[in-house]
Image (spheres, grey):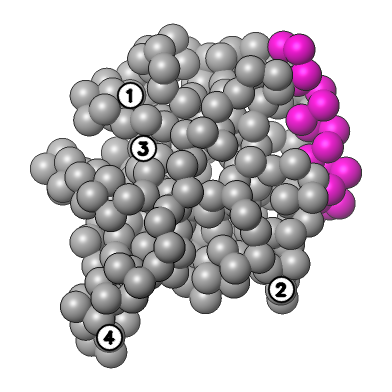
Amino acid sequence: MSLLADLTTGAVEDAERRRSELPLSAVERRAEAQPSALDAVGFLSSDDAIRVIAEVKRASPSRGDLAAIPDPAHQARLYAEGGAAAISVLTEGRRFKGSLDDLTAVKCAVEVPVLRKDFIATPYQVAEARAAGADLVLLIVAGLERRALAELFALITEMGMTPLVEAHSRDEVQVAADLGAPIIGVNVRDLTDFSLDRDLFARLAPEIPNGTIRVAESAVSVPDDVVRYRRDGADAVLIGEALVTGDPVATLTSFISATEGI
């Protein structure tokens, strides 16, 4: 089993355990009671400088523990202060040490869109995301059968949220484009084995339809990395490790200012 398949299986098992304690109907009622989701496309559209999706990330399978982050709401407020256009919250608990409680706390702390970043494969997980206040939900093309991907995409949209569809190949970009994804992310980290291909975004960005928000994911450590993604066509970058292991406000400020006018 690939690492992506293992992570998805674990995430679904954990969701099923939560479902046994709180049925889908109850989660849907909570979702319906939430204020309308924010327009993520509007927040991530960029003309003057690159937009940053700043990630609340405690750990990863490739790097292990990164930061304790005892107060995710405080971390998110720092991101907003530094100019983040959206906040990504890793809610997977086994390998990334996140939770839906983190997402709820972040949503209450900031006025920018919040992304549920997890291994989403069931309608229950989508309903959980909206019930926790998510404005965006990540869908990973490589982790889903095409019918399931289309059904989850439609459900996310129906619930008023925005799907961020993640691709790792030319074929997967085409799948995302065929869905009509308003935001397509290219993750240069291969989630089957967590290897990096730093040139992947540059190769795939031209395949993403005009008018779609292009998001570069992974391999951002210094301002030059962000500048490179911007020059290769990125509207936004998703950054986690560089922000949780350093000064998030100063780091965000330097990353964003480096792309002004590009």
Count of marks placed on residues: 4
Cα separation between marks 2 and 3: 28 Å
Determine whether 24 is above or below 96 in the image. Answer: below
Which residue is the site of mark 1? Answer: 173
Of residues 178 and 35, the one drawn nearer to the viewer in this rendering: 35
Q: Residue 52 at what x, y percent from top left?
A: 65, 37
Q: Which mark is residue 22?
A: 4
Q: Residue 181 at what x, y percent from top left?
A: 32, 31
Which residue is the site of mark 3? Answer: 165
Q: Secondary structure at mark 3?
A: strand
Earlier residue among tags 4 and 2: 4
Cα separation between marks 4 and 2: 25 Å
Q: Secondary structure at mark 2?
A: loop
Which residue is the site of mark 2? Answer: 71
Point 41% across, 32% down: residue: 183
Q: Residue 45 at what x, y percent from top left?
A: 55, 27
